Amino acid sequence: MILVTGGAGFIGSNFVLDWLAGSQEAVLNLDKLTYAGNRANLAALQGDARHVFVQGDVGDSALVGRLLAEHQPRAIVHFAAESHVDRSIHGAGDFIDTNIVGTFRLLEAARAYWGGLPEKEKADFRFLHVSTDEVYGSLAPGAPAFTEQHVYEPNSPYSASKAASDHLVRAWHHTHGLPVLTTNCSNNYGPYHFPEKLIPLMITNALAGKPLPVYGDGMQVRDWLYVGDHCSAIRRVLEAGRPGQTYNVGGWNEQPNIEIVHTICTLLDEMRPREGGPSYRTQIAHVKDRPGHDRRYAIDARKIERELGWRPAETFETGIRKTVQWYLNHPDWVAQVQSGAYRDWVATQYGAAAGA
Ligand code: NAD
Ligand code: DAU
């Protein structure tokens, strides 16, 4: 089997669902179930013996050591993290604890387990670390997209914590020989995306008749990738990536935020028009910018295409349509995640009126 950490979050749950749809190999899913973790994402796996869920912390060395000894996974795919930049600005403690210390403890537990494996299993073992393009910092307009050689220049507490974890993973390979792989991916979107992030926030706020809060001028550029394509890239890297290497993953789809918001409004105008009202665009509200806001990210994904033959299957047009449709089809999931804790966050970030 494989051990997946953070498999109840947005990308992790998509990964587990896709994995078990295409393979008989079991998944041990270790997730702390923070505000971002949601067992409802995995409801389709209820009663499926191939999925073993354990609620726990990647930083709990005793627990992780026990799980590795008991289940003997052939690989670890490490998604678990605090992932929201705005939350890292309000308070970075959890980001340091999970992204840095948690990754360190997981690496140590993996090293101890791996060191005791027979030669063949030892050679085949992989530790795949799921990271982000944000570690590279911000690009000037027209500058070439991030390659794997780009200097690390993290600007937010979140990206600094992810950069630190990338360095730990690299060092555990260089010093200890642990067979690691790192992926640095651009912005994902798709089903089960927690509505604190731009795309699901815009869809759910639009449908609720709330303002669509665009930070600053809305001209910050992100490179969007459908989550299923990120999952296929991770599967491919796990299968054929060279230990010690890093692979950038992206969708060749750079767009300013305001364009993304306009696209969502246009799709909702078509798929769920406001009753007798004007376009959802009238709900757009420019608000105070994010402190230290990175202006542009763009991924050069030629290495993973050249070496491993991976390319995204979805275009942004097909992926965003599917995503809007998924949110329209899952009002119960949206209502469930917009719990008391979610309303507290919205009030903290956007003001008390927005949290009501
Ligand atoms: P998410 O916030 O939706 O999910 C994170 C999951 O990790 C949750 O289920 C949470 O309960 C779990 N978790 C948090 N702390 C934990 C701990 N200490 N022990 C065990 N589980 C813990 O995040 P996501 O958007 O799915 O991102 C997953 C990974 O992918 C992260 O490492 C993130 O940095 C990376 N990434 C995300 C994106 C993106 O656009 N969302 C892009 C590139 C890379
Ligand atoms: O690039 C990969 C990263 O993408 C991941 O590592 C992170 O885990 C993930 O959260 C995401 O980070 P971003 O900060 O780019 O995503 P977010 O959805 O928070 O914001 C996307 C853009 O939209 C960003 O420029 C900020 C802007 N934004 C966001 C929110 C929540 C707004 O304008 N208004 C908002 O309310």
Image (spheres, rainbow, N blue to C red):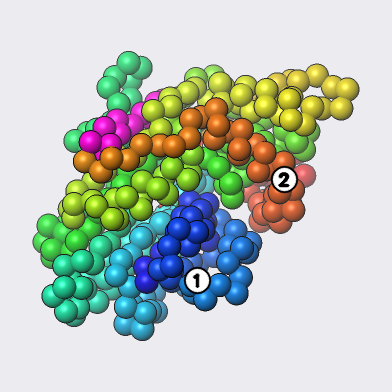
Residue 76 seen in the current view: yes
Residue drawn where x is 48% and y is 44% of the image:
227
In the shown orientation, is residue 231 left or right of residue 206?
left
Q: Residues within 10 Å of mark 2 (few under 14, many from 20)?
A: few
In the shown orientation, is residue 126 left or right of residue 44?
left
- The question of residue 232 being in magenta is answered with no
Residue drawn where x is 54% and y is 35% of the image:
319
User: Mark 2 vs ligand 1: CB under 8 Å?
Assistant: no
User: Mark 1 vs ligand 1: CB under 8 Å?
Assistant: no
340 vs 318, nearest the viewer? 318
Residue on which the image places disc 2: 329
Kind of residue at disc 1? His
Residue closest to the far right: 276
Residue on which the image places disc 1: 51
In the shown orientation, is residue 282 left or right of residue 122?
right
Q: Quadrant of the C terminus?
A: top right
Please provide the residue range marked out in magenta.
292-306
What percent of the width, then of the height, locates residue 125? Answer: 23, 67
Residue drawn where x is 74% and y is 30% of the image:
271
Instruction: Check the image and report above or below for 98 versus 161.
Output: below
Q: Earlier in the sequence, mark 1 or mark 2?
A: 1
Residue drawn where x is 61% and y is 24% of the image:
263
Q: Quadrant of residue 297?
A: top left
196 vs 66, nearest the viewer? 66
Q: Quadrant of the N terminus?
A: bottom left
What percent of the width, then of the height, locates residue 266? Answer: 67, 22
Q: Residues within 10 Å of mark 1 (few under 14, many from 20)?
A: some
